[in-house]
Image: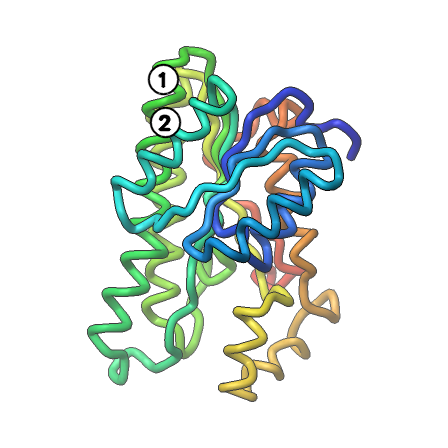
Amino acid sequence: MTGLLNGKVAIITGVASGIGRAAAALFAREGAALVAADVMADEGEAVVKSIRDGGGKAAFVRCDIARAADVEAMVAAAVKAYGRIDCAFNNAGIIGQLARTAEETEENFDRVMLIDLKGPWLCMKYEILQMLRQGKGGAIVNTASAAGLVGSHGMPTYTAAKHGVVGLTRTAALEYARAGIRINAVCPGIVDTPMTQGIMAQHPRMAQATGIMPIGRNCRPEEIAEAAAWLCSDAASFVTGHAMAVDGGLTAH
């Protein structure tokens, strides 16, 4: 891809590491001006510095996506910096603690739902409102998961939250299609990120999941970033309401 997002203003959440970090670098290379957001300020600032050092346009905003005021301020910061927003990749999220349904704690349930479901909803809410004010449409991509398409043993709350993201994505896509706002989701399989590696270190059985991947390996963060960039671009102009599995065939079983 070359210049796929030239002239676009993009918001990306969860840029401090993993998929978000890869997406920030890719979107900038493809020509987008970025507002890069994360709750981890030092790491997020480092990502933005790297983009700027490479000649890209980027600004960092500290944002807790579970707080409406933070999300509203993030969107306002993008408008202040660049005059508008054209696309957004709502990527920030957590896995939480692994446990079977009956062993799940209420604390973990509430935290995962707050960040992984309420967070993307808040992001969509304020991004859509801004795009409607602009009157020129736009594109939004949410990070769901392969666990948002099928059941996932030992991850009941994460699975429920990601199913919710897919449902929110499809509903919002229908609601705002006539306004020219396309809303899609990417559904990664097992991605080699610090978050996933941390979970695998705690639960060695998860490391065996690579063996069931039809493609024979885990996903690289850049491969999810590429899918999100395409969905945000004009090349995907007729794609909306889609939950795109980028999972090496995992959910094709």
- Residue 253 visible in the displayed image: no
Answer with the quarter of the image where residue 124 lies. Answer: top left
Answer whether labels 2 and 1 touch (C-beta < 8 Å): yes
Look at the numbered disc 2 and give the secondary structure of its residue: helix
The one of 34 and 207 positioned closer to us in this rendering: 34
Residue holding disc 2: 128
Q: Is residue 66 above or below residue 232?
A: below
Q: Quadrant of the N terminus?
A: top right
What residue do we see at 29% from left, 78% from top?
Answer: 101
Residue 67 seen in the figure:
yes
Q: Position of residue 204 (x, y in %)?
A: 56, 88
Closest to the observer: 33 or 189?
33
Q: Position of residue 28 (x, y in %)?
A: 67, 36
Q: Which residue is mark 1?
A: 132
Residue occupying the point 26% across, 40% down: 69
The alpha-carbon separation of the residues under discs 2 and 1 comes to 6 Å
The vertical placement of 247 against 227, above or below, is below
Q: Quadrant of residue 155?
A: bottom left
The percent coordinates of residue 81 (x first, y second) are: 49, 24
User: Residue at horizontal 57%, vertical 57%?
Assistant: 188
Work out which residue is located at the far left of the displayed protein and give it: 106
**205 w.r.t. 214: above or below:** below
How many neighbours does mark 1 have within 10 angstroms: few (below 14), some (14-19), or many (20 or more)? some
Q: Amino acid at mark 2?
A: Ile
- Position of residue 90 relative to residue 79, above or below, is below
- x and y, in percent, of residue 96 in the image: 38, 71
Name the one closer to the observer, 9 or 145: 9
> Which amino acid type corresponds to the residue marked 1 in the rendered image?
Leu
Q: Which mark is residue 159?
A: none
Q: Secondary structure at mark 1?
A: helix
Seen from the viewer's position, the closer of residues 71 and 41 is 41
Say which quadrant the C terminus sits in: bottom right
